[in-house]
Image: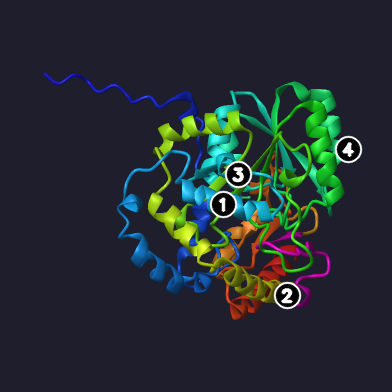
Amino acid sequence: MALPLTPIMYSARAQKMRASEIRELLKLTESEDIISFGGGMPDPTLFPKNEFAEIAKDVVRNEKALQYSPTDGIKPFRETVSRLLRKKGLRITYEDVLITTGSQQALDLISKVYLDPGDVVVSESPTYLSAIGAFKSYEADLIGIEMDEDGMDMDKLRNYLDEKDSRCKFIYTIPTYQNPSGITMSYEKRKELLEIAREYNKPIIEDDPYGELAYEGEMAKPIKSLPNSDLVAYLGTGSKILAPSLRVAWIVGPDELLKKCSMGKQSADLCTSALTQSLAKEFIDRGFLAPHLEKLKRVYREKRDAILEAMEKYFPSTVTWTHPNGGLFIWATLPKGMNTSEMLPRALEKGIAYVPGRAFHPDGSGENTLRINFSFSTLEEIDKGVKRLGELIKEAMA
Ligand SMILES: Cc1ncc(COP(=O)(O)O)c(C=O)c1O
């Protein structure tokens, strides 16, 4: 006789997981006729397909590229990454680099090794949506610190740490061309953040996927390149400068942190694909990266200029927005009382997508804000899409 089936119980953690309403809605943007300012996707026409095709012919013939590989990453790629990062001022060798399957895995591993339920992560507000997701999946609370034009408000950070420091496990920051705001932290604030971290003995997680995409001026100095930055773990990724599908990224950090993350990675995926690490390594070692970056910067700068011009032309004067010097995003603020989440279904009907700002606020505020990506759409789509968005905002205001 068959035993009666008992309901399958998910873990308490899984029971708390909620599908994001916004992600569900944004799935619709995969349809061809929507102009998407939603995801943070690179321009697909810029993927260096020919270079990868040439490299792949050699790489797939090497059986090591098809084999399991060390959890920390293949040594030649760790060497290549450490060489790149030394050019950004980090004083490191390959042993300071742990390869991860995308920076998203780095965020997950760091959460896994640092966070217990009820711990606190302090970040900028707004901050990267999927970092919030990673921290919350380990049942941490997130405290967002407001930003000024030059990054996180350091007085507010200090005040928070003075009052409630005990459960803060680390400070998470995206100092350069921040996702979602496009804001870059000034050099002075980088130094101050490091001082605060040392004073309160809190690690800094410095997430830097966009640092190379600088359209004006000098590339910003990573916090990890400053003196006495042992408390900083630095995250980089090939997603925006090579191709997101490679899923190659890196953590540079203190030895014990990398060891813990490596143990955590073993149970997550054993190793990052040696095939894609080899493709990325060869791409960089054969000298393809520098000209590719020049091309990315040229095209994205043009798109950034086009979108800012279109916003000036089509948006009502009561809307304000950031003017990023690099990266992929613009952050717009509508008048108080407006709600960009409620506007999204109507936007999709009009054939246009963006991400409502609330999703990036740890405390669920920011109803009147939105993130606009400018890398994915063509110049023509940018003009058409911003026009529609402007009309939508005017409709919603009326
Ligand atoms: C700030 C930030 N961190 C991490 C990631 C994840 O990148 P990856 O594709 O390497 O997982 C992104 C992707 O958009 C990002 O914007």
Q: Closer to the N terminus: mark 2 or mark 1?
A: 1
Q: Is residue 47 magenta?
A: no
Q: Is residue 313 magenta?
A: yes
Q: Closer to the N terminus: mark 2 or mark 4?
A: 4
Disc sitting over residue 305 in the figure = 2
Distance from disc 3 to disc 1, alpha carbons, whole Å, reads 9 Å
Look at the numbered discs 3 and 4 and tell me whether their residues touch, using CB distance below 8 Å. no
Residue type marked 4: Asp
Distance from disc 2 to disc 1, alpha carbons, whole Å, reads 31 Å
Which residue does the numbered mark 4 point to in the structure image?
Answer: 155
Distance from disc 4 to disc 1, alpha carbons, whole Å, reads 35 Å
Of 209 and 51, the residue lying toward us: 51
Secondary structure of the residue carrying tag 1 is helix
Q: Is residue 142 left or right of residue 1?
A: right
Q: Closer to the N terminus: mark 2 or mark 3?
A: 3
Q: Closer to the N terminus: mark 4 or mark 1?
A: 1
Residue type marked 3: Thr
Distance from disc 2 to disc 3, alpha carbons, whole Å, reads 38 Å
Q: Closer to the N terminus: mark 3 or mark 4?
A: 3
Measuring from the top left, give residue 108's x and y in whole percent: 54, 37
Secondary structure of the residue carrying tag 3 is loop
**Discs 2/1, front:** 1
* Residue range (magenta): 309-333
Measuring from the top left, give residue 80's x and y in whole percent: 54, 54
Which residue does the numbered mark 1 point to in the structure image?
Answer: 81
Measuring from the top left, give residue 136's x and y in whole percent: 58, 34
Look at the numbered discs 2 and 3 and tell me whether their residues touch, using CB distance below 8 Å. no
Q: Is residue 296 left or right of residue 186?
A: left
